[in-house]
Amino acid sequence: MHKSRLAGFIIDCDTNDLDAAATFWAGALGAPAKQAENTAASHYIGLDMPPGEPYMEVQKVDHASRVHLDIETDDIEAEVTRLEQLGAKRITALNDWVVMEAPSGQRFCVVPVVRDGFDEQANTWDE
């Protein structure tokens, strides 16, 4: 048995100015941008979402701009297998997460647990 739930959304930006992209999305969503620890090296700028809401990050990428979602889980391999059985494809493993593609073509990531309240709010899946 394992658990999973929606973790957050990543706004992929094919840009050389991640700060400007984060400023736009912060204004559009009414969620102030968090200061990255090392803006020169970071590919992510988080937005300060209200407590309990999924996280939102702006990410610098080298592919077409799009939005993707993250599914958090307490068992990456079990969740990837469950999603493959639903028709998703494993694209690649990076660090401690897996990039997948839905049968309809959208990319998404399966990531370790990151948000509070996971045990109480996540879906429970029987293997």
Image (tube, rainbow, N blue to C red):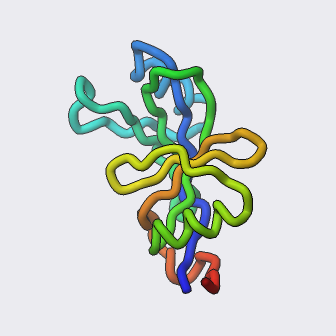
- At a point 55% along the width and 63% down the height, the residue shown is 80
- At a point 41% along the width and 22% down the height, the residue shown is 18
Q: Is residue 127 left or right of residue 34?
A: right
Name the quarter where the C terminus is drawn.
bottom right
- At a point 55% along the width and 86% down the height, the residue shown is 1
Q: Relative to residue 43, is residue 53 depicted above or below?
A: below
User: Looking at the image, can residue 49 be seen?
Assistant: no
Q: Relative to residue 92, is residue 28 depicted above or below?
A: above
- Residue 101: x percent and y percent? 64, 45
- At a point 69% along the width and 40% down the height, the residue shown is 106
Q: Nearer the viewer, residue 34 or 108?
A: 108
- Residue 4: x percent and y percent? 57, 71
- Residue 118: x percent and y percent? 50, 75
Name the residue at the right extreme: 104
- Residue 41: x percent and y percent? 24, 28
Q: Nearer the viewer, residue 30 or 83?
A: 83
Q: Nearer the viewer, residue 43 or 93?
A: 93
Image quadrant of residue 25?
A: top right
Name the residue at the top extreme: 16
User: Looking at the image, can residue 71 be seen?
Assistant: yes
